[in-house]
Amino acid sequence: MPLLKVVDRDGKEHDVEAKAGLKVMETLRELDYGIAAICGGMCSCATCHIYVDPAWVPKLPPAMSDERELLAELSYHNGETSRLSCQVEMTNDLAGMRVTIAPDE
């Protein structure tokens, strides 16, 4: 299983095993310090907002327009490396990727 480096809202970094082929959201919502993911991955709530470490951004497919619009409309903490974790599929090529859970809205 690929390793995901997760920085929680308190700034503590955790090494988490993620399953390739699943969305990053599916791993994060199972953690006590993870995300809410209220919509269950339907790209309609932004409660799975993360920041991807800048070094990893070029390795991800670009955000689709609905993801970009949702982040712009629903997140006060939207930044250059913001993504919805429900839209990022974990792959073996992303082993070691570092993400930070965005502040609660």
Image: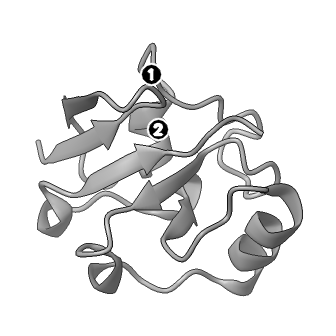
Q: How is the image coloured?
A: one colour
Q: Amino acid at mark 1?
A: Glu
Mark identifier at residue 30: 1
Relative to 45, residue 28 above or below: above
Question: x%, y% of residue 52?
Answer: 39, 62
Whether label 2 touches label 1, CB < 8 Å:
yes
Front residue of 35 and 89: 35
Relative to 43, residue 60 above or below: below
Q: Is residue 22 visible?
A: no
- Mark 1: which secondary structure? loop
Q: How much space separates mark 2 and mark 1, taking CA atoms?
A: 7 Å
Q: Amino acid at mark 2?
A: Glu
Q: Quadrant of residue 38?
A: top right
Question: x%, y% of residue 88?
Answer: 45, 63
Question: x%, y% of residue 74?
Answer: 85, 57
Question: x%, y% of residue 1?
Answer: 11, 42
Q: Is residue 58 visible?
A: yes
Q: Residue at x 39, y 35 (%)?
A: 27
Q: Residue at x 31, y 57 (%)?
A: 90
Residue labelled with disc 2: 26
- Crowdedness near tag 2: few (<14), some (14–19) or many (≥20) residues, C-alpha within 10 Å: many
Q: Quadrant of residue 80?
A: bottom right
- Mark 2: which secondary structure? helix
